[in-house]
Image (spheres, rainbow, N blue to C red):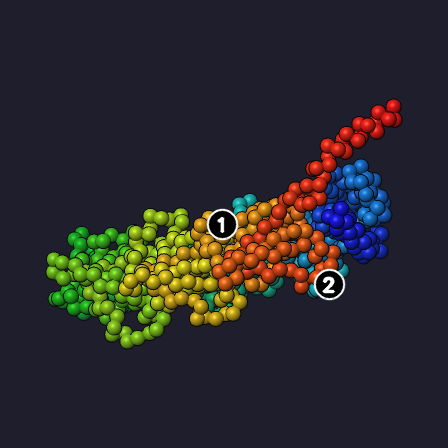
Amino acid sequence: MARIKIIMGTLLLALVSIVLSPVPQASADDGVLRAGDVLEIRFPGEEAFADPFQIGLDGSIEVPEIGTVLLAGKPLAEAEADLRSQLNSVYRDISRFSIALLDRRLLVQVLGFVKEPGLVDLPASANIQTAITEAGGLAQGAQLDRLQLRRGESVKTFDYKAYLDSGDVAILPDLEPMDIVFVPASPLIGNVQVEFDARTLTAAGDAGEGGSAVKVFGEVLKPGSFAFKEGQSVVDMIMRAGGVTRYAGVEKIRVISEGSPSLFNLTDFLDTGNTALLPPVKAGTTIYVPISVEEVKAGVRTIYVMGEVAKPGAYDMTEGATFFDVLANSGGPTRYADTRKLRIIRTDGTVAEFDLAGYTNGVVGGPAPAVYPGDAIFVPEKADQLEKSWLTVAPGQAVHVMGQVGRPGRFEWSSEMSLLDLLAHAGGPTRFADPSSIQILKQDGDNAKPVLFDLDAFIQNGGQLSTLPRIEAGDTIMVPELPRSPSDMRSLWVRQSSERSIYVMGAVGTPGRFAFNENLHFLDILSAADGPRPDADIQAIRVTHRGESGSRVSKVNMALYFETGDETLLPHVRPGDVIYVPSHNRTWIEKKAERHVRVIGSVGAPGRYAFDDTMTILDLLAEAGGPSPEAWQEQIVVVNMVDGSAKAQSFNLVKFARTGDFSTLPVVRAGDTVYVPNASQSDWAIFIDGVRDVISVLSIFALIGAL
């Protein structure tokens, strides 16, 4: 009976709190609902209605237990009445049900030449520019003066470019829900989708209209179509096309205006300045600058320079000119030239090779090759770095770079280069590289001797450049790779030595072996292992120090560290150490008894539970699932160990629930035992069991007497 009263009192308090809680009021905005509106459905006690509901493009929302309900086009009061009517068939009490309009939104589709076409959700005050911005902005090739606003069957075209030029918002039509903003493609992009921008357009002209544009092509630097402007001459149009090239036949420029062709001699005009020589330029004029075949030099004194030089071409060779004179006159080799394999093609068909790089470095002796009129000097292009043949660089001048660098391979080596130069030339270490243990394999006669270098420490701490390992031709540099994940790339762990590893085991996100250096500490290693899992017992972390003499284990209480921030609580770890994070769910034999309290008897989950001085018997009973229905709550027994002897004290949970007097709570310490007896052990239960048969006999006699 006492338990029933407690339960009834708890229910009464809950009902009073519900009745007295404030009820949200409906919005005062009773306007007609439309697509995009955000509604709040207030239904106390139902978690399914906690989040707002937005009306979709079809004018409906998805209501739990009912399904799709059409609301667009209805006033707020009518929509509430419809929802109330449909919910009444599913829920028993909807007296406190109401809806409110939280926000007006615009659901608009932006299609066509925008970067992210599709549906956008906008504020009620948004305009066309806001919608285009939400769609990622205009894509290259969009036609700004022909934007369309489609609303149902009607289509309205407006000039978005005029708005951008003037800022006049009146040019932009107002938006409504379910509108479609369409951005058409410019007719200049043709029927094939290509990537271009303003620079691409101007490189081929200035995007003039096709009917009136002036077309300039041939031997000009920037052929294309240009907008027609009154008063411009042929020279003006050629200048707009970047001028003529060195091979242009300026004496025979062809001009076609209104279907009538004419020749224009630019040389005569420049010599005389007579404007009467300029043919008229009208809308649609075509100007063609031909190539001048007479400018291609040929003769008995001509020498040809081809390939990767700054100015390839034919040059008149004067008396006494040498190989270097001709090469310098052509601007010299470019950065892409392979200067080790220059070829001189003689007039008799023979070919002579010349190592210019070796000659300038003093490796190749003797005089430079002689050249004669009619010869051709060919400077080849370097082979691509990724596909370069190993024969291109002699073995005595090459260094091998392997492993985690941007471009591994064989590289030409010079004595003035350092290890940093070589790594930079190879693209530098990748993000998966381990720069702290770069291996340099040096040749020593027929033997190879490895040398380790910590590039990471050199970069972090600096130092003398003279301490960098000396690289010589024939050496091999290996940049090792770090294991990327201890869980899904287990084959890579063999690449990491034990002397540089920390072992993390137990209840962590990613247990395994992790690379370690002197700049890392205990928290870095736990973070690399994705930290302790939710079931981890962070009060009992153990660190085994393997590198020290004997066996030493550190105990780490991370919970105490998080409370105090005391860095001295964290151990100092070194390569080879093992970090073990135990789980709360380990078997009871792994847990020390002096840190736990036993809860036995009529409780939901009897067992051993972790206990500290901040907890009470109420916390302990709650952790054990609370007393079961058959528990004798008036006579809970607490067995304490005091000075090695057991002492028992009782606790009346029912009385505590009536009074709430915390002073009556018994003291519970780690190592104690809490026993919750069964109600069948009470005097009242024993009495009822003793008189049950007597009550049954009296009931039979009473029945006979009534008959």
Q: Which mark is residue 585?
A: 1
Q: Earlier in the sequence, mark 2 or mark 1?
A: 2
Kindly identify the residue that appears in the image at 70 percent across and 64 percent down. 167
C-alpha gap between disc 2 and disc 1: 69 Å
Q: Please name whichever residue, 458 or 401, is drawn nearer the observer in this view of the structure.
A: 458
Asked if disc 2 and disc 1 are in contact, CB closer than 8 Å, the reply is no
Q: Residues within 10 Å of mark 1 (few under 14, many from 20)?
A: few
Determine whether, in the image, residue 586 is placed left or right of residue 656.
Answer: left
Q: Residues within 10 Å of mark 2 (few under 14, many from 20)?
A: few
Kindly identify the residue that appears in the image at 84 percent across and 29 percent down. 702
How many numbered marks, from 0 up? 2
**Which residue in the rendered view is the most extreme toward the bottom?**
464
Mark nearer the viewer, 2 or 1:
1
Query: Residue 344 occupies which quadrant of the picture?
Result: bottom left
Say whether residue 371 is visible: no
Please provide percent x and percent y for residue 586. 46, 50
Determine whether, in the image, residue 413 is placed left or right of residue 204.
Answer: left
Residue type pointed to by label 1: Asn
Please provide percent x and percent y for residue 529. 43, 56
**Which residue in the rendered view is the most extreme toward the right?**
706
Q: Is residue 321 above or below residue 131?
A: below
Dot 2 lies on which element?
loop
Please provide percent x and percent y for residue 319. 19, 68
Say whether residue 601 is visible: yes
Residue at the disc numbered 2: 168
Determine whether, in the image, residue 695 is placed left or right of residue 341.
Answer: right
Dot 1 lies on which element?
loop
Q: Please name whichever residue, 404 or 570, is drawn nearer the observer in this view of the structure.
A: 570
Q: Is residue 167 above or below residue 627?
A: below
Residue type pointed to by label 2: Asp
